Every structure is written in C-alpha cells, then in structure tokens.
Amino acid sequence: MRLTKITFYLLFIPLISCSQKPDVQHETFNELWTLLDERYSLFDIREVDWQKVKEAYEPKLNDVDTEDELFDLCCQMISELHDGHTSLIDSKSDLRCNSFTYSDTAAILKAYESKEAFWKVSDATLKSNGFNELQEIDEHVFVSSNERFGYIRLNLMAGTYQAFAEALDQVKDKDGLILDIRLNPGGNDETLHKIAGRLVDETYISHYKETRMAGKNEYTKLRSWEVRPEGPYQFLKPIALLTSNFTASASDVFTLSLKGRENVTIVGTPTMGAMSHVASQRLKNGWRLNYSNKRTYSRDMVLYEGKGIPPDVFVESVDPTKDQVVLKAIELLQD
C-alpha cells in the first residue's frame, strides 16, 4: 500500500504542475492589446478596428516559439496603428520597433539616398541663390543668409532654443526668413513654444489637448496651450516655414502654433500628423510600451492627427539636382 501511495503522488504532482503552467506568450500579447484598448486615444482617427486586429493576430501565436518571435508579432500588430508615437522596446534584447517607419514613408527620404544627400542638394541650392556657407550653431541648428533673406535649419525641437536664438540674432535685420523644419522629428512643448514666441508679438491660444480616461471612451476637459512673445525681440517680417511629412511631434505642433499667422507661409508638403504626447507603460515581462493617449486640436478645433497640417503652398522636393521647396520659399519672400 505504501509503495502504491508514493507512486501515485509522484505521478500526480507533475500533472498538476503542467496543468497550471501559465501561457506567458498569450498573457503578454493580451496585456499589450488590452493596455492599448483601454488607453490609446486615436483608434477612430486612424480608422483602426482594434478588436479585428486582435482577431487577426492572436491565432499567429500558435507559430511563436521564442520571445523574440513574440516581440516581432507584437510589433506587427502595433504597426496597424501607423502612429509614430507608438513603439515597443525590449531593453534586454536591445530590440525596438515603431508603429510608423519614417524612412519608408517620408517622400524626401524616398527621393534621395539619405538625409545627407538631401541636405547636399539643399545647400547647393542655397549657395546658387547667394546664400553663404551654412554655419553650424550646434549639431541641430544651422544658419545662412544672402543679401535679403535669412535661412535657419532647425533639426530638433528639444534643447535647441539658445542655438536658435543665436541663429536668429544673425539674420534679424534681413527682409525675411526661411525656417526649415522638414527633417525635424520633434522634441518637447517647452522648446517649441519658446521658439514660436520669438516669431510672434502677442499672446494667443495655439492649440488644445485632451487625454483619454483609462478604460473609458471619454476624454478629459480640453486644456489650452498658449504662445507668448519671448526674448529681447521678435522676428515679425515674412517667414517661409518649410515642412514635410517627416516634420513630426513637437514640430507638428510648432507648425500648428504658427499656422494662420499673417506673416507666416507654410511651404512644402503636409506634416506627419503625430501630435499626441507619449504615455509609457512597462509590461510584466519587462517590455516597455509607448503610446498616444491624447488628441491635439488647432485653435479652431481642427484635428490634423493622422493627416498632417497642410501647407499654404504645396511643393515637393523630388528633383535630385535642386531643392524646389527652397526655391519656392525664396520666390514667395521676394513678392
């Protein structure tokens, strides 16, 4: 009897252990999907049926054997959002994916081999129109000018206010300014508002934001954001603001803040249309999910998310020998 009883326990314990073994892959997949389902703010704007996305991707878990394969599947799922503010990070394996791949969508980067190749053509176009050699203020801010107009290239909207102010000092007496943010992927609200404040002479509401309430299809009360004059002087002469669909995030909002100003003409192609703040949540397995949890409206309550802010003058730079957007900006400033 004693031998039979011991044998029974030895056989039974493993069966209990196997039956209670958690399905970690399904758990992680569902945790990620649910987090977005309850907190993501742009499903309707981006025309995504999130339940149908789950139904399409969940069966694919049957073919997943490793954590890296699971990460890849989850990346494929969030790519359905096409949102540059949504990303997944696995710091243990040094893996990262974004829901929106800039290089696959930005027309500028499709027409040219690289950013460097694009800027080489742009620099040559400036030079052929009398602009001097670009001066590097810092790694993200460059300035040049010809007899009449200034040119500032601003490639980041974070920690660049002082460099921008120094560049502006060099062109403040010119008749007009070309401000180029075509390859500016964003930054933060503080910087964008301070830079915008150097270009306006009054305080006004630039945009509104609202935040999705977790677990509800409801949003907080609209919060207004203001631009107010900054610095010792403001540049109020004609400005050509150059944009592309690489112009994103804080640069999107910067464009929104200046849209409609009497002295500002937006030239180029629509911005990316990614204007939400980024919320962040760590999953149980250590992955970090970043996602959009807000909506941003213009001061006249237009939502440009997913569509981009349209330019006043549409021009594409697709000619490998000249920068057509810069040429149009010079033409507009001369009128």
Image (cartoon, helix red, strand yellow):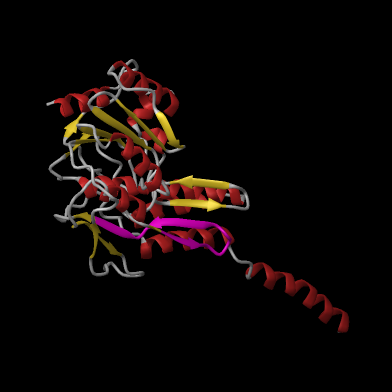
The answer to if 96 sits in the magenta stretch is no
- The spot of residue 266 in percent (x, y) is 20, 37
- The spot of residue 161 in percent (x, y) is 37, 47
- Quadrant of the drawing holding the N terminus: bottom right
Q: Nearer the viewer, residue 183 or 227?
A: 227
The answer to if 290 sits in the magenta stretch is yes
Q: Residue at x 77, y 72 (%)?
A: 11
Vertical arrangement, residue 325 with respect to residue 281, above or below: above
Name the image quarter holding residue 207.
bottom left
Q: Which residues are magenta?
A: 279-296
- Quadrant of the drawing holding the C terminus: top left
Q: Residue at x 47, y 48 (%)?
A: 75
Name the image quarter holding residue 146.
top left
Q: Is residue 230 visible?
A: yes
Extreme residue in the bottom direction: 1
Q: Is residue 139 left or right of residue 324?
A: right
Principal secondary structure, stretch drawn in magenta: strand
- The spot of residue 95 in percent (x, y) is 56, 47
Vertical arrangement, residue 52 with respect to residue 251, above or below: below
